[in-house]
Amino acid sequence: RTDCPHIPQQLIPILSGNPLTLRQLAQRLGIKPTEAEDDLRHLVKSLVHGEWKLVVTPACCRKCGFEFGPDKLHKPSKCPECQATWLTEPEMEIVRRDA
């Protein structure tokens, strides 16, 4: 749960070497995607000075190739360039900083 202080640390082994979309992560944790996004944002803050970092493979448009920023953790609704809705979901993974 989002109100559980241990969830962010539980994300490290789940996402370490295993890229997942926000929806897949939420499903694995048994929570809503918005809660998973909140937990990920909290984790990013707690990882700032640690040995791990969150790497985001950004969402992109499958029609024109537009790539969204890595700060967008959920799937956008449409492409700002061509207005298409055929978009990939961003994937998140935890990696060691020295890797």
Image (cartoon, rainbow, N blue to C red):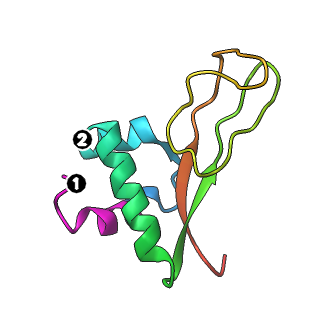
Circle 1 packing at 10 Å, graded few (<14), some (14-19), many (20+), is some
Residue 33, x across and y down, in percent: 34, 38
Q: Which residue is nearer to you in this view: 91 or 60?
A: 60
* In this view, the mark in front (2 or 1): 1
Q: Are marks 2 and 1 in contact (CB under 8 Å)?
A: yes
Q: Is residue 90 above or below residue 83?
A: below
Amino acid on which the number 2 mark rests in the picture: Ile
Give the distance between the C-alpha atoms of the residues marked 2 and 1, in whole angstroms.
Answer: 8 Å
- Please tell me in which quadrant of the rendered image residue 2 appears: bottom left
Q: What is the span of residues highlighted in magenta in the rendered image?
A: 1-12
Residue ID for mark 2: 31
Q: Residue at x 53, y 51 (%)?
A: 92
Secondary structure of the residue carrying tag 1 is loop
Left or right: 20 in relation to 70 = left
Circle 2 packing at 10 Å, graded few (<14), some (14-19), many (20+), is some
Q: Is residue 65 above or below residue 83?
A: below
